[in-house]
């Protein structure tokens, strides 16, 4: 479901900047595509550097950044754990703006 925040299970083959420990991800793709075998998500971080493509949200665990510049496609059955929260409409709007900027898309319509 779009905007859902899930625990993300570690990828034991991950290298580089992906960190271990307690991690979360926000589901970004439209809910109508939940039947796909892979979901597009963005990890969150409380320690990353803030920038325009990393909107700050609070889904109930305190302020965190959605790393729109670190999009990943995951198998939800393998990588996504329990749903722990959901973004507000305002937070989803901030994510949409960040994605539009990052991907050079037309700005999303105003609500």
Image: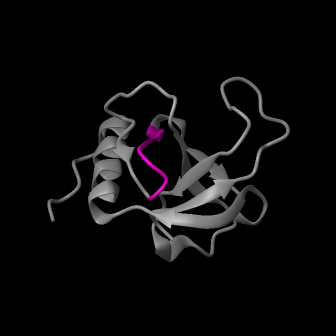
Region rendered in magenta = 60-68
The residue at 35%/28% (across/down) is: 51
The residue at 72%/39% (across/down) is: 21
Is residue 12 shown above or below 51? below
Q: How is the image coloured?
A: one colour
Residue furthest out toward the left: 110
Residue 75, given in percent of the width and then of the height, sits at 72, 59
Q: Is residue 65 magenta?
A: yes
The residue at 43%/58% (across/down) is: 59
Q: Is residue 30 magenta?
A: no
Residue 41, given in percent of the width and then of the height, sits at 55, 52
Q: Is residue 27 left or right of residue 38?
A: left
Is residue 1 shown above or below 67? below
Residue 44, given in percent of the width and then of the height, sits at 53, 43
Residue 104: which quarter of the image?
top left
Q: Give the total number of marks visible in the rendering.
A: 0
In the depicted view, which residue is nearer to us: 85 or 108? 85
Assign the C terminus to one quadrant of the image. Answer: bottom left
Q: Is residue 36 left or right of residue 13?
A: left
The residue at 34%/63% (across/down) is: 88
Residue 72: which quarter of the image?
top right
């Amino acid at each position: 479901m779009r905007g859902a925040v899930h625990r993300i299970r570690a990828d034991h083959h991950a290298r580089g900047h992906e960190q271990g420990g307690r991690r979360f991800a926000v589901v970004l793709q439209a809910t109508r595509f939940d039947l796909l075998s892979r979901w597009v998500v963005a990890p969150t971080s409380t320690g990353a550097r803030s920038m325009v493509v990393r909107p700050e949200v609070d889904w109930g665990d305190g302020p965190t950044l959605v790393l729109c510049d670190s999009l990943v496609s995951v198998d939800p059955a393998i990588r996504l754990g329990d749903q722990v929260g959901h973004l507000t409409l305002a937070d989803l709007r901030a994510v949409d703006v960040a994605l539009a900027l990052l991907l050079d898309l037309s700005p999303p319509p105003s609500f």
